[in-house]
Image (cartoon, grey):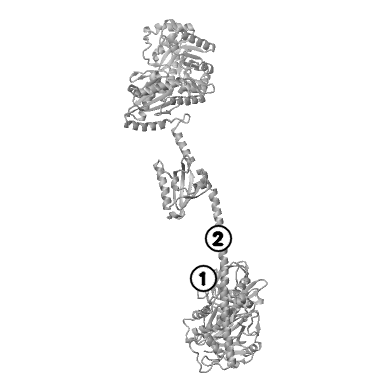
Amino acid sequence: MRLSSVVWHADSGWSADLSSLGADSPGTWVLGMSAGNEIPTAALGELRSRFATSAFTACSTSGCILDAEISDEPLVVTVVEFERTTPVVLTEAIADHPDSASVGRRIAASALTMQDEMPAPLAALLIFSDGLTINGTGLVEGLNAGLPADVPFSGGLAGDGSRFARTWVDDGSGPREGVVSAVALYSNSLKLSHGSQGGWEAFGPTRTVTRSRDNVLFELDNRPALELYQEYLGDRVAELPASALLYPLALVDDPQNMLTRTILGIDKTSQSMTFAGDVPEGAKARLMRTSMELLIDGAHTAAQSAQTSDQDESLGDTLVLTVSCVGRRLVLGQRTDDELEVVAGEFGDVTMVGYYSYGEISPVSHGTSGPAPGGSALHNQTMTLTLIAEEA
Amino acid sequence: MGSNLGPVEPPESAGSTDPPGLHRLLVRQLRRATLSADRVPTDPDAWSHLLSSISEAYADADASRYLTERAFRVVDKEMSALYEELRSRSADQLAQERDRLQAVFDAVGTAICVVGPDQEISAVNPATESLSGQSEESLIGIPVRGWCRGTDSYAAEKSRQLLLSSIERAVPCRVEEMQLNLGQDEPLHASVTYRPLEQGEPRAGGVLAISDRTEHRKAQEEVVWGATHDVLTGLVNRPMIMELMTANNQLVRLSPSLTAVLTIDLDQFKLLNDSRGQAIGDRLLVAVANRILEVSKDSHTLSRIGSDEFLLLLGSLTDPDEAARVAQAVLRALARPFDLGAGERVLTTASIGIAVDDGTLTASELVRNADLALSHCRTGGPGRYLMFDDSMLNSAAEHARQLQHLRSAASNRELTPRFQPLFDLRTNALLGFEALAHWMSPDGPAAPDEFIPIAERNGLIAGIDRSIISQAIAFLDQATQNGAGPDLAMAINVSSVTLMQERIGPEIKRMLSRRGLDPNRIIVEITETALIEHPEEAIAVLQQLSDFGMRLALDDFGRGYSSMTWVRSFPLDVIKLDQSFVQQVTDDGRERAIVQAMTDLSHALGIRVVAEGIETPNQLARIREIDVDIGQGFYLGRPLVWDQAMELALTWADTDLKSANVLLGPAAGFSRPEPDSASATYSI
């Protein structure tokens, strides 16, 4: 497996000649991440032309990760040339399905169907989803339902800085809103490991979700949820909905397996808040808070838990697909690099590529730090890592 | 590292190094501003970039601090509000709980008292006020110990100590019954439950629940009273007086005093009860009890031990004559007329048996002796008393021995009939015989006055009656077959006990049918006793006998109550005048007038009259003058054994009464009986 990266900037263009990147082949996967306000349409088009036969995915983000640094460049590209793995991109439009779970089930079914044409079985899926119109919980449920237990999937939802206005995914046919793309990896030699950790702690009184619908929360303890958040945010209410990320919601019915929900948007008319996962009525919830130190420690823990015992030099190049939450970036500010540095420091000579998202997907259970019993889960406010390598 | 980075590579200046101790963020900011910590910046843009970064970091820190502080303030406010709400809700809930408990406390019927740390009453419910008759204010502060004063019973004292000790040790307890002095005139009998508020901690106090057991106890006492007293008179009953006597007996043994028992029996009480009704009888018994109590001392105990029988226990006597004096006083008291209200005025007498003990007899023996004395006393007539002596005990022993022999004789059919002739006093014709029971006891011929009452009291009489009747009918049958006149009659005696056995009529009828004898030849003799004791049943049986064709005779008429009511009420054919009339009719004009009147009245009712006990020619002459129909007695013919009677029956047809005494005299082989000699026969 060979890795190479390039950055595109509106003023200066590509940081390196595209021809210097890997070969365009069915074994190549091109991952593009964009953190700018504008969609780098031309650059994406140029890139798609260059890698016309390769698997192609790009998405909007809330910050691009390349190695131990974050950047808000318009386009950061990583080219992964697999030697014994075939990447295939599968895309479903959310609007074509009655619900998000159906999207997940359809993608899973397609990936499994396609393996008949592949030289190797389905080994894993990497998910890149629209970040605003999807119900992440439903999507994960559908994928869990459709995939065998030995096929892990991870990834995240696309971001839009702290604007929460528009997210997009490009599966090689151009950037689109309201789609979910999955990179299906067919291989007999793929080595994967996962890590995920938050660093947030619940505080304040335990509240009851008294009115909600799926991932839309209306009331906590019979009080408008948005009103409660506004009270906590004070002067920073003007920064809504991004500032609400500073107070994720913990669902605490099972104290051993607390679920974290991060905000995707607000509706001042209905005083409601939309979260990246379901907030069931009757659930017990607490607000969460963190500090920079807690977040950095969380990232370190995620990196430690992703270390596998058989990880050694023989794996060759390793890609660390890093998906962290935009809420973490809001808290960390200029110290966001700190959490990336502790991860990089843990792994040493690997390539960290990824982005800040509106939701992370990983098969790691936060309660047990091991594989989630029901498959993967949607996480929020976490540093989520997927280590990808091929046996030499 | 396989990455191939372009413009985003950090533009670090060659040769520069970060000085130790700088914050990693500042180092990063310097790097991004293309500056080095060890050189003063010369590039204004780079310097400006650095300052912007630092300023932004400060702003981030401010924002973070603001958020943290605000979060604390809001959380504090929320938690305070929650706390207040919780406290308010808790207070409301506590108030509701308290109100609910107070309602239960007030409504419950059991007296409940809260005991404070000093074992004083600190709260009471209305049931306690009601039970004690005192207000809450006056009850508060009273020490529980004050309610549990000393008691005279060991069990009550034990209960008291259990309760007080439980309160002092703060352990739960339940006392089923104890006495509490809650301020009423009488101590309260109650069951008490104590529950400490904190086990083992007396200072925490506790709760007392008191249930009134007074009514329960009263009911128990009533049951005990009912079991030991006579409900009518309120006197102690026989079991109780026996118990008291046993206790008294033990005391007597410890002191030189004497104990006497008087058994007092009303004469003719049954007659009064039957003739004037039970209500009058009951009133008389109450009045008699009161009269006896009037002449009794505190040391005397009166008991009603039977229908009309009283027992007066005299304790602490020094002289047996004291008992006699009390008996005299009782007899005097009872001799006065009793005014029983509603115009009912009754005269009665009593018989008294007295027994005295110096501590050597048991209670049963003492009463037995008094009963024996009473029994002997009765034979001497009414209104007397008799002191027990040892000869009576011998007599009683004799009585028991006789009973044993009689029982054996009855079961072995050793009692046989003797036949006493009955003569028509106008024609001198032999009308028939009366079959009389005869017993040759191991000691010789038994006096009927002794063995017949024994047989009656011990259930032997019915068997004896049947045996004699059966043999009498067999005699009549044989005599008829041998050629005796077809009108020859046989008088048989039926006791009151036998009469009440409904089978007796059909049984006699069957005996006659089997032998082909006309029932009209049988005269069934009954006594007044049967009519008095069971008049309704008696009249039914007598009517049945009459319907069967048998004739009915009332025996011993004039001996007892002698009411002409019987003559009118029962289908009688014959009355037999008691021999006491016959024996006095010769010298007493008054007796003669009575006999004459009874005879005339009977004749007017179509009833024939028999004179019993004719023992002299003079008596026979007088009886004839009075126009009595039939005669019977030793002068005319004493009771004969089977063969003798058979001979008489077969030969009399040619003989008349004029020569009766010749026929029945030495020429006939019979000896004249002496009037005062013990008879071996008895007319039953």
In the foreground, A180 or A159: A159
Residue B563 in sight from this viewpoint: yes
Residue neighbourhood size for the residue with mark 2, other residues' Cα within 10 Å, grouped as few (<14), some (14–19), many (≥20)? few
In the foreground, B497 or A367: A367
Q: Which residue matches tag 2?
A: B90
Establish if B278 lies above or below B428. Answer: below
For label 1, the SS is: helix
Q: CA distance from mark 2 to mark 1?
A: 30 Å
Q: Position of residue A306 (x, y in %)?
A: 50, 80
Q: Quadrant of residue B74?
A: bottom right
Establish if B204 lies above or below A11. Answer: above
Q: Is residue B452 left or right of residue B35?
A: left
Q: Which residue matches tag 1?
A: A256
Image quadrant containing the C terminus of chain B: top left
Q: Is residue B74 left or right of residue B499?
A: right
Establish if B627 lies above or below B16. Answer: above
Instruction: Give, as a three-letter code, the residue at label 2.
Output: Ser
